[in-house]
Image (cartoon, grey):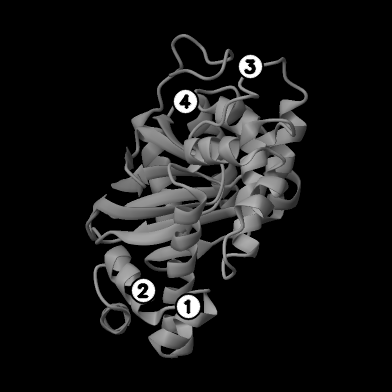
Amino acid sequence: MIESSFLPEDPPPRKEEDCQRLATLIERYCTGDGPNATPIPGLSLYRASSTSTPVCAIYRSVLAVAAQGRKRLSLADENFEYDSRHYLITSVDLPVIGQITEASPEHPYLCAVIDLDPRRIAELAGQLPPGPDLALRAALGLGVSPLTGPVMDATLRLVSLLDTPEDIPVLAPLYLQELLYRLLTGALGGRLRTLAAADSQSHRMARAIEWIKGNYDQPLSIDALAGAANMSKSTLHHHFKALTAMSPLQYQKQLRLQEARKILLTEGIDAASAALRVGYESPSQFSREYRRQFGAPPVRDVARLR
């Protein structure tokens, strides 16, 4: 569904040669598989030489443009796929399951990932004519759209600055501004507009998500959460699920399990101690939910990852 009145009727398609140019740039500046930081603020590059098993992660608010390969994301019961013909946007932090489904040493998965700053989006949206009236609706915080020529061109200009690092301080903010404009006036622009609008349900849900993230290791207080979002408890549940595809309690559980997994990997403590750290009162309940989420008990899962 088109969510912006600015989207052209026939948006220019991205060109195959542009995808190849972007792929060449990403390979040039990726020193290895996995995420690779760059000198451009907010831009990282990702490379994978093989397909992967499903991996749980928290996706922050980003734009992802894949130049080569394919990736599948699952958010609760919703599934999404993107490749060199599509771009992906997440408008809030979301616990997802990601799997690279197309990659090889000869043709690795290559992707440019750009952080989306709600403040910059709000500033730019305020300079544009009003879009569709979505202020009262919280759209799902993850979307995939066909990759148009304007979005690809703006992405290429930004990533190409890696070849001329002396230009980054001056030109990177300008190219990022152009890219945000293309996104705001594109098919997924409505999601970004509602997140940036201070009186929108999406903006209130973003505040609720920040509250959960700051208190994930405490018992979930729906009253406090509703107060943070400035809405009734029933309205909170409805719009939270519309944005995240899960309830606040399910969202908190995802955060707890992923934080526990990180603690187990990095600190080497036992599962019961990790369970207490993230807010579980029952180690046995923690182990059951951990196994259900990651496919193996904590000790076996961590050993496999290592």
Mark 2, residue position: 285
Mark 3, residue position: 133
- Please report contact status of discs 2 and 3: CB closer than 8 Å, yes or no: no
Instruction: Compare marks 4 and 2 and give the one earlier in the sequence.
Output: 4
Amino acid type, residue under disc 1 in the picture: Glu
Q: Nearer the viewer, mark 4 or mark 3?
A: 3
Q: Front-most of 106 and 61? A: 61
Q: Nearer the viewer, mark 3 or mark 1?
A: 1
Q: Quadrant of the C terminus?
A: bottom left
Q: Quadrant of the N terminus?
A: top left
Amino acid type, residue under disc 4 in the picture: Gly
How far is the residue under mark 3 from the one under mark 1?
A: 44 Å
Element type at mark 4: helix
Element type at mark 2: helix
Mark 1, residue position: 281
Q: Is residue 133 visible?
A: yes
Q: Residues within 10 Å of mark 2 (few under 14, many from 20)?
A: few
Quadrant of the image occupied by residue 290: bottom left
How far is the residue under mark 1 from the one under mark 2?
A: 8 Å
How far is the residue under mark 4 from the one under mark 3?
A: 26 Å
Query: Which residue does the image show at 44% across and 35% down from the upper left?
Result: 143
Mark 4, residue position: 149
Amino acid type, residue under disc 3 in the picture: Asp
Instruction: Compare marks 1 and 4 and give the one earlier in the sequence.
Output: 4
Q: Is residue 126 above or below residue 255?
A: above
Amino acid type, residue under disc 2 in the picture: Gln
